[in-house]
Amino acid sequence: MRLRSRNSIIAILASLFLFAACSKKPENLATLPFADDFNRSEFGKFWKGDPAWRIEDGQVFTSGTRNNALWLKLDIPDDAVIEFDARSESPVGDIKFEVYGDGKTHASGYICIFGGWKNSISAIARLDEHGSDRQEYPKKGLVKMGQTYRMKLVRKGKVLRWFVDGKRFMEFYDSEPLRGQGHNRFAFNDWEANLYFDNLKIRAATAGD
């Protein structure tokens, strides 16, 4: 009986340890307003991602990570403005990024896809890029290979607005917006395209946004 009791206690402690490890809050090393031009050789302490992500000629680059994102260690406010440059060097387009995720898991927030599904559909999705509630922009060939696009994402309240080169592109209304711990991180992402990202800026949204 004593051995059984001791084993039970060990099992309980092990479970608590695993729970604590799994629920550990992601590091928040960067501060707002945040900017990164990637003019260096290594990502450094603010970024976490698959080894397939690297810096090439002062830009973020990957030739495919199959949704293993490059996460920024920054807590993004509920209302925020995120801007960056993006370019695809693949005929499939497929520029992808994620906002208000958990800092470690694909599709833990909103997924934004520009020229996805072989450059046939663009979308904003909530927790599932294949979900029936995603907002779509069904235009083929939208992403031109080698062209740099300036992306801007603004969230205020329950509305997420996506701008491309200064023009409103898509909008997503969420009656129950993803907020707080577990929904406060940003990431660049990719499936199999050759993608470049650069000149990232993140700040809290203001009344004028």
Image (spheres, rainbow, N blue to C red):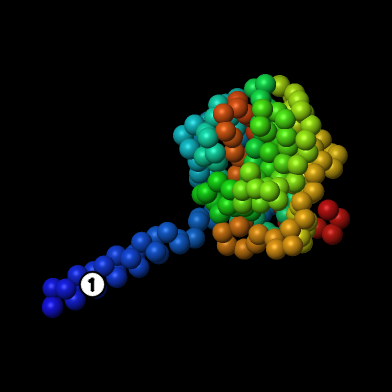
Q: How crowded is mark 1: few (under 14 residues within 10 Å), some or many (20 or more)?
A: few
Q: Where is residue 91 in the image (x, y as percent from the top left)?
A: 67, 21
* Residue located 76% across and 25% down the image: 141
**Vertical side of 106 occupied by 121: above or below:** above
**Front-most of residues 139 and 17:** 139
**Front-most of residues 174 and 150:** 174
Identify the image quadrant of residue 182.
bottom right
Residue to which mark 1 is pinned? 8
* Residue located 60% across and 27% down the image: 193
Q: Where is residue 112 in the image (x, y as percent from the top left)?
A: 68, 43
Q: Residue furthest bottom?
A: 1
Q: Where is residue 134 in the image (x, y as percent from the top left)?
A: 71, 47
**Front-most of residues 116 and 180:** 116
Q: Is residue 51 left or right of residue 174?
A: left
Q: In this view, does 5 lie to the left or right of 47?
A: left
Which residue type carries mark 1? Ser
Q: Residue furthest front?
A: 132
* Residue located 13% across and 78% down the image: 1
Callout 1: SS: helix
Q: Position of residue 92 (x, y in %)?
A: 66, 25
**Residue 205 in sight from this viewpoint:** no
**Front-most of residues 106 and 32:** 106
**Residue 189 in sight from this viewpoint:** yes
